[in-house]
Image (cartoon, rainbow, N blue to C red):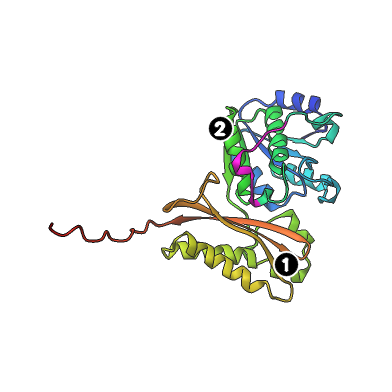
Amino acid sequence: MIVATDRAGLLRARADLAGSVGLVITMGALHAGHAALIREARERTDHVVVTVYVNPLQYEDPAVYPSAPEADCALCEAEGTQVVYLPQTVEVYRAEGPLVRVAPGPGGEGLEAAGRPGYFDGVLTVMLKMTNLVRPDAVFLGEKDFQQLALFQRMIFDLDVPTEVVGVPTVRESDGLALSSRNTRLSPTERITALTLPRALTAGVQAASAGGRAQDVLAAARKVLDEAAHGQIPVQPLYVELTGPGLEPAPRAGQAWLLAAVQVGATRLIDGMPLTLTEHPGPSPGPGPGPG
């Protein structure tokens, strides 16, 4: 496995990869969820490139994000990665920083961007840069960060970037908690409390499976979160939203995504689950006009 720390090294390594290439874009602190992305990329392509970089455009202080480059490289090598790109910021953005950034459009407002103006500008900018450098045949992203996945898919489509985007299902612990590097910040008690998030989403999915409308799905999920707001360690709901597959408003019937974020202690957690909404007949039309 080659570990490249600058653009020149990455481009040399990329030039030696004959055949199809899969790209996994990460911020490090890799875990079993990232390993699943790498395995999916390895199954679908001939070679895998993993980028490991904490993006300052989306974090005011990147130093607060957990960093373990040696462990990250060990996981990548164990999963059969051919190239790891581990750059410093000066290699990614150069000294003057990016003067041009990607605007995400309406889908980049709200949810994870609420209260963080320009957040997805930074996310998409770095993801596009990594994609342009690696020139992959496919990019593999986790469905847990569904808003990011949907925005990336739209960017690739709108800008005619010649690559496929593959969404990979969320990897969960045996008790249902979605794998995340942020889970390491939870105390044992907070870790138990965090299970409220997947339980709330599951309640929403079950409401949809029982034929519930969008408002029933949201009510079921919010009920679980509201009940946990008064526990020993309160769960603070940040949002619970139902969207279409492209972040458009959820359809009356068809595929949708239930997305939620909560604060548990000092840790922000996000998750999402797909579901299917069922069409409900509208009210029966009233009787027609009587004879004149």
Q: Is mark 2 on a helix, strand or loop?
A: helix
* Residue 151 in view (yes/no): yes
Give me the residue at 62% from left, 74% from top. 227
Can you identify the residue that label 1 sits on?
A: 191
Q: Quick check: 191 above or below 279?
A: below
Give me the residue at 64% from left, 51% from top. 111
Q: Quick check: 246 above or below 264?
A: above
- Mark 2 and mark 1: Cα distance apart in space: 38 Å
Please identify, in this view, whether the residue under mark 2 or under mark 1 is nearer the observer.
2
x and y, in percent, of residue 98 in the image: 78, 30
Instruction: Look at the numbered discs 2 and 1 and tell me whether their residues touch, using CB distance below 8 Å.
Output: no
What's the amino acid at mark 2?
Phe
Q: Quadrant of the N terminus?
A: top right
Give me the residue at 36% from left, 59% from top. 280
Which numbered disc covers residue 251? none
Q: Does the magenta stretch include residue 202?
A: no
Sooner in the amino-acid sequence: mark 2 or mark 1? 2
What's the amino acid at mark 1?
Arg
Residue 290 lies in quadrant: bottom left
x and y, in percent, of residue 124 in the image: 68, 37
Can you identify the residue that label 2 sits on?
A: 157
Q: What element carries label 1?
A: helix
Number of other residues with Cα within 10 Å of mark 1, as a class: few under 14, some 14 to 19, many 20 or more: some
Which stretch did the figure color magenta?
A: 101-111
Number of other residues with Cα within 10 Å of mark 2, as a class: few under 14, some 14 to 19, many 20 or more: some
Q: Is residue 106 magenta?
A: yes
Q: Quick check: 32 above or below 38?
A: below
Count of numbered circles in the view: 2
Viewer-proximal residue among 265 and 172: 265
Q: Quadrant of the C terminus?
A: bottom left
Most common secondary structure along the magenta stretch: loop
